[in-house]
Image (tube, grey):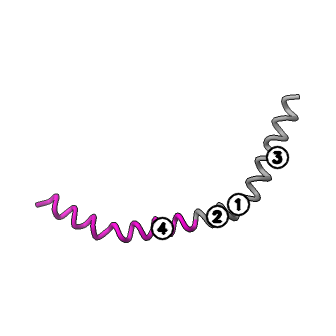
Amino acid sequence: MKVVYANFILLQLVPDWLNECQKFIDGLTSFLFQTVQGGEQLIILCQTRRFVSNS
């Protein structure tokens, strides 16, 4: 009986969890889009640094 009850609670929680998950993914996606240019600059900077320190 406990298992059935737990499953019922899970079923009730899942839509909220999926909704939160979707919000998180949307937020992460927009954050990534915003930081793509900054990230590219950072990668170039790191590669340049590594090149300079190796030579």
Name the element at disc 1.
helix
Relative side of 6 to 40, left or right: left
Proximity of marks 2 and 3: CB atoms separated by less than 8 Å: no
Give the class, few, some or many, for how many residues have Cα within 10 Å of label 2's Cα (few <14, many ≥20): few
Indicate the secondary structure of the residue bearing disc 3.
helix
> Which residue in the structure is indicated by mark 4?
22
Look at the image and give the residue range highlighted in magenta.
1-27
Q: Viewed as shown, does residue 4 lie left or right of 32?
A: left
For label 2, the residue is: 31
Tell me the amino acid under the disc marked 2. Phe
Residue 13 in the magenta stretch? The answer is yes
Q: Please, what is the three-letter code of the amino acid marked with disc 3? A: Leu
Q: CA distance from mark 1 to mark 3?
A: 15 Å
State whether residue 5 is above or below residue 40.
Answer: below
* Residue for point 80% across, 40% down: 47
Image spot of residue 8 (x, y percent): 22, 67
